[in-house]
């Protein structure tokens, strides 16, 4: 929810002035915290994926054909 949407929702409920400003500030801080957490989780998944990718073979394995 953007700051404008939050201000509109608060005004619709009759909340204005310093109280509304503080609630909008808290909402903005929560958005930033949420983005940071999401980026941290994506980074963790990337690191986990890289650790599994290191174990992949560099060249395709050829199936051994028995000599007859």
Image (cartoon, helix red, strand yellow):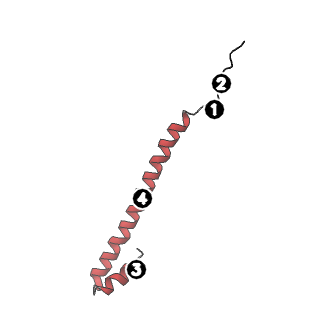
The structure residue drawn at horizontal position 38% and vertical position 62%, both measured from the top left corner, is 33
| Image depth: mark 3 or mark 2 in front | 2
Quarter of the rendering containing residue 19: bottom left
In-front residue for pair 7/65: 65
Marks 2 and 4: CB-CB under 8 Å?
no
Q: CA distance from mark 4 to mark 3?
A: 22 Å
Q: CA distance from mark 1 to mark 4?
A: 34 Å
The structure residue drawn at horizontal position 28% and vertical position 85%, both measured from the top left corner, is 13
Chain-order first, disc 3 or disc 1 = 3
Chain-order first, disc 2 or disc 4 = 4
Q: Which residue is mark 1?
A: 58
Q: CA distance from mark 3 to mark 1?
A: 52 Å
Q: Which residue is mark 4?
A: 36
Q: CA distance from mark 3 to mark 2?
A: 62 Å
Q: Which residue is mark 2?
A: 63
- In the image: residue 23, left or right of residue 40: left
SS for dot 2:
loop
SS for dot 4:
helix
| Image depth: mark 4 or mark 3 in front | 3
Q: Which residue is mark 3?
A: 5
Q: Position of residue 37 (x, y in %)?
A: 40, 56
């Amino acid at each position: 929810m953007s700051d404008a949407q939050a201000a509109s929702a608060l005004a619709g409920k009759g909340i204005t002035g310093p109280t509304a400003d503080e609630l909008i500030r808290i909402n903005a801080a929560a958005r930033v915290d949420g983005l940071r957490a999401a980026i941290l989780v994506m980074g963790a998944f990337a690191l986990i994926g890289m650790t599994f990718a290191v174990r992949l073979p560099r060249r395709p394995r050829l199936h051994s054909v028995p000599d007859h």
